[in-house]
Image (tube, rainbow, N blue to C red):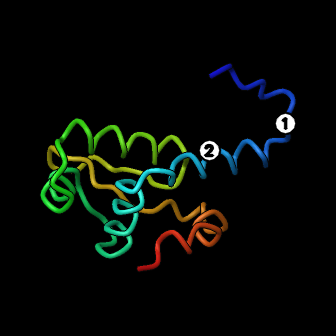
Amino acid sequence: MGAIKFANYPQTQIRKSDVARAVSVPARITILKEIIAEGRTNGLYLTEVLRLSQPTIHHHLMVLKSSGLIKGDYFEESYFWYLNSECENELNAISWFLED
C-alpha cells in the first residue's frame, strides 16, 4: 500500500480515518466496550477477558491511544486505560460499533 499524502486532505478527514482504522478490528471494539463498562482498566484484565496475549493487547491499546480514543495513567506498576473525554464527538460517531 502506498503512503498517504496527508497534505492533500483536510485535518478532519485524516482524524476520521484514524478513528475508523482504530475501530476496524473486533478486538479493539471489545477493548473499548470493556473500558466503557469498567470505567478504567489495565492490560492484565483485558488479557484475561479477551484471552489474547499481553503483546497483542498492548498493540491494540497503542493503536487506540494513537487514535486519541483512550488515555492511560501509570499507577502501581501498571497502566490504567480510560476513554479520552476530549473525544466525545468521535465516540458518539462510533457508538454503533459499541452496541451489542
Q: Residue at x 51, y 51 (%)?
A: 24
Q: Residue at x 34, y 54 (%)?
A: 27
Question: As drawn, which residue projects farthest toward the front?
Answer: 1
Residue 24 falls left or right of residue 89: left
- Name the residue carrying label 2: 18
Which label is found at residue 68? Answer: none
For label 2, the SS is: helix
Question: As rendered, which of 77 and 33 lies closer to the eye?
Answer: 33
Q: Position of residue 90 (x, y in %)?
A: 63, 63
Q: Position of residue 65 (x, y in %)?
A: 46, 45
Q: Position of residue 11 (x, y in %)?
A: 79, 42
Question: As drawn, which residue projects farthest toward the bottom?
Answer: 100
- Name the residue carrying label 1: 9
Residue 11 falls left or right of residue 77: right
Q: Amino acid at mark 2?
A: Asp
Instruction: Report, in whole angstroms, how far the alpha carbon at label 1 lies from the one at label 2.
Output: 13 Å
Q: Is residue 72 above or below residue 37?
A: above
Question: As rendered, which of 77 and 68 lies closer to the eye?
Answer: 68
